[in-house]
Image (spheres, coloured by chain):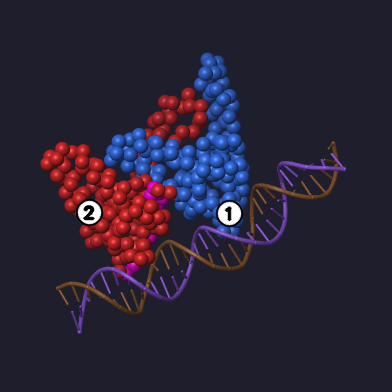
Chain colours: A blue, B red, C brown, D purple
DNA sequence: TGGGATATTATGGGCGTCAATGGAATGCCC
DNA sequence: GGGCATTCCATTGACGCCCATAATATCCCA
């Protein structure tokens, strides 16, 4: 498996450390990245995280804009400027920075959510809400679509 | 890691010295540059800083203009003319010149912000404003995009 | 198929190292 | 000699690294 899938809820210990789920670790290992690249999600109270795949996605995104353009500066600031590469200890744990925790409203429990090439870290309650809202909209969209054609939804349901 | 990422806020001591964040130092070391190349950012109250990578970027930028053109002269003056190479002491600290500090409105606290191939040094409050403004515009841009293409985006979330 | 042996995971804690910071001492220039 | 700046050392708190334990999942073999 080379994709982040499923969701796991884990606790932070007294030092603020939290284990990266083993299945996610193995994806990171395959990706060949030391540490965990992460940043506050732009439009959600959550943390985006991943390895090389995520970094190069961001690099490509920024690289598309012409150098010195306002747009590029903005992206570089919001993405590079807020990114961190967390160290992973021998047991596969990381400590989230205060900035990241504050953005996601994380105290001492988090849920990891696989999104394919990257994953998200949520405060569990907020994740439940997000998930409920997403499935809700997806259902509505799907029933709307299926009356016309299913062409835009090759994967069927996705939870 | 060979990029400047994340942001760190540090204090100047009574002699005006400030530590370059360790993660930035390691990037500079890999870049193989003694000292810190910096100059006042062209259109912002901040200081641009970096190593060889930054210097060659500037060289390329200026090289694009035709020799002796007004534009080239202006850029050369604004960038080369105002650049300084700060010495890094044994503990990884630099002393910002008064010119640089005045340009950025820096007193005794600064935040270092990674931008990939270079980093910026801000007065913390101004940095917060700049970051807030950038993420704001990015969010607007993104919702504009997703309202058009969401229906046929099988991957769901898109950043 | 059950049940025990084994491997792996999540979690807790101790300890040494390093980064950030402050201050002293030394050298240099006017 | 007085000020300025650079180099050196000292402190403190955080962090990385190591080992220990418990719970779980996995495997293996009767």
The magenta segment: B3-14
- The secondary structure type at the circle numbered 1 is loop
Q: Residue at x 49, y 53 (%)?
A: A97
Classify the position of the C terminus of chain B by image quarter: top left
Asked if residue A159 lies in the magenta stretch, the reply is no
Quarter of the rendering containing residue B122: bottom left
Residue B100 in the image, given as x and y percentages of width and height: 24, 57
**Nearer to me, A93 or B28:** B28
| Residue A46 in view of the camera | no
Residue matched to label 2: B83
Q: Residue at x 38, y 49 (%)?
A: B4
| Residue B158 in view of the camera | yes
Asked if residue B7 lies in the magenta stretch, the reply is yes
**Residues at marks 2 and 1, CA–CA distance in whole angstroms:** 43 Å
Instruction: Please indicate whether residue A57 sits to the left or right of residue A135 in the image.
Output: left
Disc 2: host chain: B
Quarter of the rendering containing residue A124: top right
Q: Which mark is residue A90?
A: 1
């Amino acid at each position: 498996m080379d994709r982040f899938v499923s969701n796991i809820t884990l606790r932070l210990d007294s030092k603020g450390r939290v284990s990266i789920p083993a299945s996610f670790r193995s994806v990171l290992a395959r990706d060949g990245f030391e540490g965990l690249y992460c940043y506050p999600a732009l439009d959600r109270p959550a943390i985006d995280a991943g390895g090389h795949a995520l970094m190069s996605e961001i690099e490509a995104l920024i690289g598309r804009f012409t150098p010195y353009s306002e747009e590029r500066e903005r992206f570089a600031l919001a993405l590079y400027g807020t990114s961190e590469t967390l160290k992973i200890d021998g047991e596969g744990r990381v400590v989230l920075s205060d900035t990241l925790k504050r953005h996601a409203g994380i105290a001492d429990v988090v849920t990891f959510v696989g999104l394919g090439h990257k994953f998200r870290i949520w405060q569990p309650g907020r994740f439940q809400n997000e998930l409920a809202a997403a499935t809700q909209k997806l259902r509505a969209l799907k029933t709307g679509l299926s009356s016309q054609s299913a062409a835009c939804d090759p994967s069927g349901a996705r939870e």
